[in-house]
Amino acid sequence: MSIAPYLKEIGRGARGAKPLTRAQAGDLFGQVLDGRASDLEVGAFCLAMRVKGETTAEMAGFLDATHARLQRLPASTRPVVVVPSYNGARKLPLLTPLLALLLAREGLPVLVHGHATEDTRVTAHDVLARLGVAPRAALARIECGDVAFVPTPLLHAGLARLLDVRRVVGLRNAGHSVVKLMQPVQGAAVVVGSYTHPAFATVMAELFALLGMTALLSRGLEGEVTSDPRRTPQLDGFVRGQPLPLQAQQPGTAVEVPGLPTATDAATTADYTRAVLAGTRPLPAALAAQVAHLVQLARDA
């Protein structure tokens, strides 16, 4: 087998490319994950999809292939909140570890998974390590009230290899979309989903509905799933695929956020996270709303 026939369909540019069916996309992505495509073919696939853009059916096929191969964590006694973290901090502090620890404080089991594909950003791994949350070396059930950080290679080595293509070509690929949507636990879960481009918000919403997932969807902060603390974003929920509008977007962007540091390094971010958890610095309202809605979705999952 080869992915060359698929490349002929998707590699004809933004206007000439043809969409794949869900089954075709699943076969293509499965070959990539299994290492049956050459490096040249994988590079062509990444660039072709970058130009063409993924359809809902194609993303469903990519997720089918991923879920069929993932090493999943065992189910917990409560729904696991799944927090993907693949971008890291750029201009604002990374709030993903804070979101995860706030959810754990509500008694939920929380899975943060991620894999760094560039060296210039502070990652969840960096901050969580300073907060005493070491990466898991093996897959095990997450207890209620705990945060587990699981590196992507533990879930699937082929998926991590696909993400690493970014280090060569300098661009994100379909693998970066898959990891923001996948459900790497057995049993009930709530996936925290985010988007940067509005067009992908439509694809994500259609996927959550099509796959019957329980999830929270909003515009992310520099590619991370946390709400921007300077804004009141639109929040949309899904309970086993059924859409549930949660919060309407409000206009305006705050110039300053009380207590939020200007530095983005891991040490400063960890100190800020501790201070918010201790109540000595205020919790941004946008993050408080996100936590409250995720707690409710976990009850309904």
Image (spheres, rainbow, N blue to C red):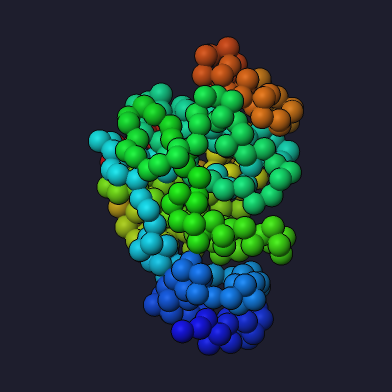
Q: Is residue 13 left or right of residue 160?
A: right
Residue ID at (51%, 83%): 2
In what quadrant of the picture does the C terminus appear? Answer: top left
Residue ID at (50%, 45%): 151
- Residue 288: x and y in percent read 49, 28
Q: Outermost residue toward the front?
A: 137
Q: How many marks?
A: 0
Residue ID at (71%, 45%): 119
Please, is residue 115 above or below residue 279 in the view? Answer: below
| The quarter of the displayed image where residue 63 is located | bottom left
- Residue 225: x and y in percent read 54, 43
Q: Outermost residue toward the left?
A: 77
- Residue 69: x and y in percent read 38, 62
| The quarter of the displayed image where residue 51 is located | bottom right
Please, is residue 176 above or below residue 21 in the view? Answer: above
Please, is residue 270 above or below residue 17 in the view? Answer: above
Q: Outermost residue toward the top?
A: 280
**Can residue 63 be seen in the rendering of this structure?**
yes
Residue ID at (62%, 82%): 11
- Residue 154: x and y in percent read 45, 49
Residue nearest the viewer, comparing 232 with 81: 81
Please, is residue 45 above or below residue 276 in the view? Answer: below
Residue nearest the viewer, comparing 154 with 76: 154
Q: Is residue 263 left or right of residue 244?
A: right
Residue nearest the viewer, comparing 1 with 207: 1
**Can residue 99 be seen in the rendering of this structure?**
no
